[in-house]
Each structure stands twice: as structure tokens, then as C-alpha cells.
Amino acid sequence: MTVEDAAEARRLISRALRLSSAEQVIIGIGPTALLAAGLCWPGSRLVMGSGQDGADLALLDVLSSERVEERFDEVVVVSGDGIFSEAVAALGAHGIDVTVVALAGSCSKRLRLAAGRTLFLDPAAAYLEGVA
């Protein structure tokens, strides 16, 4: 991941979610993208995992071991990976409003069903909007 890639991801996600500086952002990241993500998401918490699903597993650890359901009313998971389905369903069962944000056409059906709301990003449309 380049700094430009990380900056574009932040722009798309921030625009879609209307993020404010008060939001707590936790990013699961692999070691090769750590610097780019850190530069483009100042103030965020980076949790790193290596290997296959390493970043996903690092985020799942946060969701399962840090009492998220006791501390937050809303959680947004930016991933289309089905590995998050059980954690998202568990949060929803605790009354947490869970939104999944994924690239259009890249979201697991199980994850969509587990989430209270799903928002799809279309990078091509977002890029065209930025040109106007």
C-alpha cells in the first residue's frame, strides 16, 4: 500500500461516513502498509497482524477482548470479509448499531446479513464526483 492508496481510502471512508475528529478509528493493518496508514490516519490506533488474515485477526481481537459492547453504541466495520460475521452478529445481539462498509461487489453475504446496515463504496464514482 502506498501513501496515495491510504490517503484515497481515508478520503472515501471519511466522505461516506462523515467522520469527525471525535471518532475513534482503529485500523487493522499488515506490516508492509503500517507506515502509509499511520501517515494518512493521524490519531488513529493501528493494530498490526502478519500473515494471511493477520490484520483481520488483529481487529477481531479488539472486538472480542476490549469490551466494545460496553463502551460504544455504534460500531462501523470497514471490510467485506466474512471473517467478521460472528463478531458483528454478537455486537448486534448486545444492542450495538453495527454498520458494515465495503467496496461494491466485495461484501460477504453472511456479513451483510449480520450487520444492521451495509454501505457500499464505489471508488470510481467517488473519483468522478471529486473531478466535478
Image (tube, helix red, strand yellow):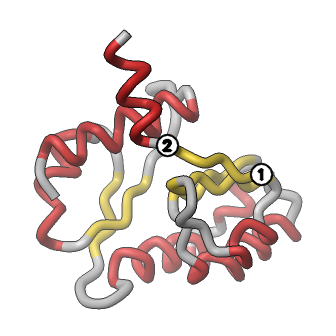
Q: Is residue 118 left or right of residue 52?
A: right
57 above or below 88? Answer: below
Q: Quadrant of residue 104?
A: bottom right
Residue 109 at x, y percent in the picture: 71, 74
Question: Image point 25% across, 89% down: which residue?
Answer: 51
As helix, strand or loop, the secondary structure at mark 1 comes to strand
Residue 82 at x, y percent in the picture: 60, 79
Which residue lies under the disc numbered 1? Answer: 117
Of callouts 1 and 2, which one flags the residue occurring earlier in the amino acid sequence? 1
Q: Label 1 vs label 2: CA separation?
A: 17 Å
Q: Which mark is residue 6?
A: none
Say which of 5 and 56 sits in front: 5
Instruction: Say which amino acid is labelled 2.
Output: Asp
Residue 1 at x, y percent in the picture: 16, 59
Instruction: Say which amino acid is labelled 1.
Output: Arg
Q: Nearer the viewer, mark 1 or mark 2?
A: 2
As helix, strand or loop, the secondary structure at mark 2 comes to loop
Question: Image point 65% across, 63% down: which residue?
Answer: 68
38 above or below 48? Answer: above
Q: Is residue 15 left or right of residue 132?
A: right
Say which of 50 and 68 sits in front: 50
Q: Which mark is residue 122?
A: 2
Quadrant showing the C terminus: top left
Residue 108 at x, y percent in the picture: 63, 74
Q: Residues within 10 Å of mark 1 (few under 14, many from 20)?
A: few
Question: Image point 60% across, 76% down: which residue?
Answer: 84
Say which of 76 and 96 sits in front: 76
